[in-house]
Amino acid sequence: MQDKMEVWNPEGLSRLRRLAIKWFSENGRKLPWRITSDPYAIWVSEIMLQQTQVATVIPFYHRFLASFPDVVSLAEASLDDVYRHWAGLGYYRRARQMHQTAQLVKEAHAGVFPTDFQSVRELPGIGRYTAGAILSFSADQRQPIVEANTQRLYARLLHLKQETTSKTGQSHLWSFAKLVLPKRKGSGSVNQALMEIGSQVCLPKNPLCLVCPLSDLCPTFKSGSQAMIPVPKPPKDFTDLREVALVIYDSKGRFLMRRCGSKERWAGLWDFPRFDVTPCKTEASEAIHVAEQFRERFGKSVRIGQKIHELKHAVTRYRIQLKSYEAEIDSSVRARWKEEVETLWADVDELSKLALSSSGKRLWNSVLRNRNDE
Ligand code: SF4
């Protein structure tokens, strides 16, 4: 990064703000969360937008606010009801944390969403970016923000040589994010405008430099190094896991489901009984291991039938191969049913309404498809 770069100078910064705001007023998308100053609604949108596209979020945002118009109504809803409104957005952890946060705001802040940075930052699921976004968009506070789009945009405007996630890279990006904001009012608009330019113009691949309002100020454009900045991250180091899920149903056609415990991957969501078989070398040894694990956890013997589905999915740094089998509980054994975690026998209708883990949902869809084909 060069020290004397134009975007670090007061004149350059003020020009950058002017150009960004002008472009935004003419080109910015009219999104529903941009026409409100309610911190609760902005918070809902920010959490929904994490890892989810704008077009997907819009209908969920409207439905969610229609059912939970304020933080108290969200706090007083049941978690299952919140999950139901979230179904289809994925990453249910966000919904669970929002529910917890709403309860905390109700208890600790008398049901009023806080407006000081520290209090907002301390709420579950709200990081530095989200706290800054809520307060700058709702109350025009001078809070810097760095998220995926501004991170890429600022890296290019600064010609950042470090990886954006490195300590030095982050320090440069956040310093610039603060510096770019006007001293008095207008921080909310500047943040919105720069996020929008990052998202709509300064694209990860093939940025639209020829129509970019900031191209005159951009050293990355001038040096033609858009493909090298941001500096690419090294590839992820994955751990491979193998798991088996059991689709167990009783004589009434109800399926055995379990709710994932608080320390598990999909805490709070429902899933088919699932077992790690990574150490097993063959399918026969997997079946023995799963039967033993089932007896240990649920207190009953299980008969494992035919394989019905196989899928691969990735969660954080894990690559998981999931095989699923039909299975039956051996009711001839009069052992006590152990409930190590919350379990449920759910019929087809009930199961279709449960908030399932993402791979549990894929498995359930496959079970339904197989039943319809029969
Ligand atoms: S000129 Fe190109 S690289 Fe520079 S900020 Fe604009 S879109 Fe991004």
Image (cartoon, rainbow, N blue to C red):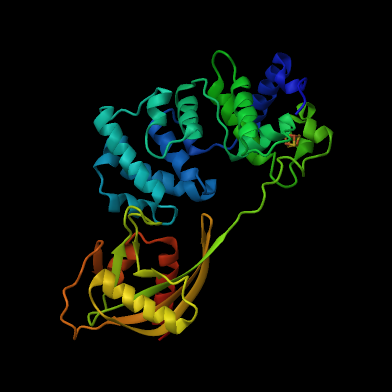
Q: Is residue 143 above or below residue 225?
A: above
Quarter of the rendered image showing ligand 1: top right
Q: Quadrant of the N terminus?
A: top right
Q: Quadrant of residue 103?
A: top left
Q: Quadrant of residue 74?
A: top left
Q: Report the side of 183 relative to 82 (left or right).
A: right
Q: In the rendering, at what x and y percent does residue 129 appear?
A: 51, 33
Q: Nearer the viewer, residue 178 or 63?
A: 178
Q: Is residue 213 visible?
A: no
Q: Quadrant of residue 331?
A: bottom left
Q: In the rendering, at what x and y percent does residue 308 appear?
A: 44, 81
Instruction: Determine the residue positioned at 27% across, 71% down.
Output: 296
Q: Is residue 306 visible?
A: yes
Q: Is residue 56 above or below residue 181?
A: below
Q: Quadrant of the C terminus?
A: bottom left
Q: Report the side of 280 relative to 21 (left or right).
A: left
Instruction: Determine the residue positioned at 33% across, 78% down.
Output: 291
Q: In the rendering, at what x and y percent does residue 148 appear?
A: 59, 40
Residue farthest to the right? 223
Report the number of numbered marks: 0
Q: In the rendering, at what x and y percent does residue 57 appear?
A: 48, 47
Q: Nearer the viewer, residue 182 or 8?
A: 8
Instruction: Determine the residue positioned at 69% across, 39% down.
Output: 201
